[in-house]
Amino acid sequence: MRTLITGGAGFVGSHLCERFLADGHEVVCVDNFITGGGGNIEHLRSNARFSFIRHDISHHIEIDGPVDNILHFASPASPVDYLRHPIPTLKVGSLGTHNTLGLAKAKKSRYLLASTSEVYGDPEVHPQREEYWGNVNPIGVRGVYDEAKRFAEAMTMAYHRSHGVNTHIVRIFNTYGERMRLDDGRVVPNLMGQALRGEPLTVYGDGSQTRSFCYVADLVEGISRLLFADFHDPVNLGNPNEVSILDFAKEILELSGANSRIEFRPLPQDDPKVRRPDITRAKQVLGWEPKIERREGMRRTMEHFRNKVNA
């Protein structure tokens, strides 16, 4: 099989490149390095079944030969990144989705869109089920990401219904693991980096807001299963084990052995108060649920960041 992955040099994308190479696929990685990095895929370049195209998928792309699978993962995904690149975020969610769906239609490819739990916004339903339509501020600062993904989902379903494209949509909840950037602005690298540098740990608000964290290997397994499933509606993938940000910061302090204090800051605009996936659909359709306990995944990730901080 020949599999094209946009955003393939990113955090999740690079793990997907590894997975599909391990499964015997030829992998074509497309990335413009706006948030991804060449270091994430450097170890793959010696593989004869791996190729890289530096390209902004918001612009038209031609791919010679057959393409069996397309996974559209290109997009800034952390608040720091999409607030720094608001217009490219909107473009890759709209134009990039259009371009990759057009390619899937032409090549008769399976297609998988990386959507996000952010489509639920600051949810009024908890935990979040796929049937929930969300509570999103379309003109708020986070709207560039939220609405780009909501539009991408709508376009994906339109191509499925109108053109018969074999589409799939994964709504990804908070994911962590090796190859996250220390400066990507999400809670795991923020708190781990601060602990490892002996700095105060920044907690926004009073820390009572909750998140649930899924280790990247579990996510990749779910994505692989979804790509080959006979199912076209969105599927939540994430870990339903919910924790408050304050308790999570305390876990990181314990794991790192740091003596840092916790420092409270004002809550950012439209920051969700709760976030936990209902994964009933993933269990029923894919036979999937996370296997890696948070403490073990955090230990592995801490070692990754420890090497970066000490480099």
Image (spheres, rainbow, N blue to C red):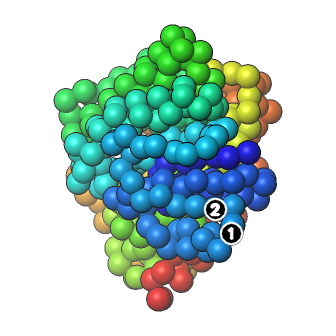
Say what secondary structure mark 1 lies in: loop
User: Where 32 falls versus 139 (above or below)?
Assistant: below
Residue 50 is labelled as: 2
The residue pinned by badge 1 equals 47
Left of 80 or right of it: where is 98?
Answer: right
| Identity of the residue drawn at 63% across and 69% down | 44
Classify mark 2: helix, strand or loop. strand
Direction top: furthest residue: 162
Q: Within 10 Å of the Cα at label 1, are there few (<14), some (14-19), or many (20+) other Cα atoms?
A: few
Position of 103 with respect to 167 (left or right) is left
The image quadrant of residue 57 is: top left
* Residue at (47, 89) in percent of width and height: 311
Residue at (39% x, 74% y) in the render: 194
Depth check, front residue: 299 or 253: 299
Q: Which mark is residue 302?
A: none
Residue positioned 43% across, 20% down in the render: 154
The answer to whether any part of residue 246 appears in the image is no
The quarter holding residue 166 reads top right
Q: Position of residue 204 (x, y in %)?
A: 31, 53
* Image x and y of residue 226, in percent: 69, 34
